[in-house]
Image (cartoon, rainbow, N blue to C red):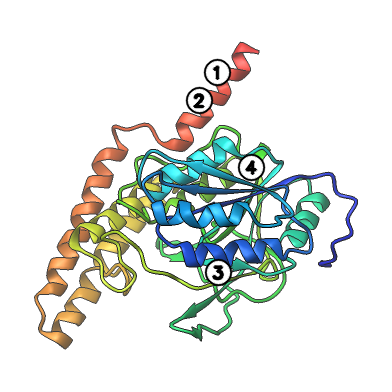
Amino acid sequence: MTSTSTSTSTLTISVMVPTYRRPADLKRCLAALRAQARPADEVLVVARPEDEATHRALETELAENNPFELRVIETGLGGQVAALNRGLDAARSDIVAITDDDAAPRADWLARIDEAFSRDPALGALGGRDWVFERGALLDGERSEVGIIRRTGKICGNHHLGVGAPRTVSLLKGANMIYRRSAVGGLRFDTRLRGKGAQPCNDLSFSLSVRRTGWKMVYDPRVAVDHFPAERFDDNGRDAQTLGALSDTAYNLHLVLREHLSPVARHAAWYWYAAIGTRAMPGLAHTLLALARTRNIACWTRYRAMRRGAHDARRDAQHEPAAYALAMRGRADGAKAA
């Protein structure tokens, strides 16, 4: 795939950047978007109305010589899901490219996006590598296994370490995910997801919903952004999560898995996360090992918080309509009306 700016494509591209209290990071992101070989048709910055620092910074950005239409979209609700849904509602282009305010797309990002979607009309979603810099150091490495769910239900993201040729995947990462608007249709990010800010697993939920409609989803590591994970202003901190945030993360994960996995697979995932789990979401085995190593009862408290969230998700999944089901119902009703 080339990355030149010359193209016969007729596709239009909206870039969506949800932001909250990170004016310096947002400035870097918008500078990277101004430097694109293929400019965006519009850039939507989705911000909360009470975020005064961001709005002051945007006054300066609006006065810049932008090669795109810069639109400021306000969301009246907190949380990333509300911001993403507000951006989807406002986007006017054929392609919606979503990135984080603490990311900086590389100069050929939009050119590669344009070419990928122009070349393959069956492509509904595209993701790429986010080169993560933590405390100034690049988290370098190589993984061929990217964007899949194993039979146990374990999520193998690795989007920040993916190498090799473009390949079909099952899920994308929020810092670098791009959708054809006709593939999204009436789908929106799941408002059932818990959390005061980041609302973990919203990207997992949405990408699985789009893929479930039958569109192709591809990961290409050359569609790249640099990612500088910034501070979060909620209880789901990058370095320290509250028990409530841990419970919310487990709730969101299990809600998504119950919606999108087969009955057999969702039961396998339920018992795997309870018995084994991962370092980030430890099951009983990981918890007992941590207790033996640290003698810290907080390990057991964390485990109980996550199981509480998992049980809440199993309960709610039986009674609340899923985002995917609601969207499909809306499409069916629209088809009948036509």
Q: Is residue 214 left or right of residue 23?
A: right
Number of the label disc, if any, that sits on residue 333: 1
Q: Which mark is residue 329?
A: 2
Mark 1 and mark 3: Cα distance apart in space: 36 Å
Q: Does the residue at mark 1 contact the one at mark 2 (Cβ under 8 Å)?
A: yes
The amino acid at mark 1 is Asp
Left or right of 92 on screen, residue 149: left
Residue 94 versus residue 197 in the image, above or below: above
- In the rendered view of the protein, which quadrant contains the N terminus? bottom right
Q: Position of residue 149 (x, y in %)?
A: 48, 61
Mark nearer the N terminus (1 vs 3): 3
Q: Amino acid at mark 2?
A: Arg
User: Could you tell me how far apart the alpha carbons at marks 4 and 3 are, in whole angstroms?
Assistant: 22 Å
Q: Which residue is mark 4?
A: 214
The Cα atoms of the two marked residues, 2 and 3, are separated by 32 Å
Q: Considering the image in quadrants, where does the C terminus appear?
A: top right
Quarter residue 192 falls in: top left
Q: Which mark is residue 159?
A: 3
Kind of residue at disc 4 = Gly
Mark found first going from the N terminus, 4 or 2: 4
Which numbered disc, 2 or 3, marks the residue that appears first in the sequence?
3
Q: Is residue 262 visible in this depiction of the protein?
A: no
Q: Which residue is nearer to you in this view: 277 or 301?
A: 301
Q: Secondary structure at mark 2?
A: helix
Closer to the chain start, of discs 4 and 3, is 3
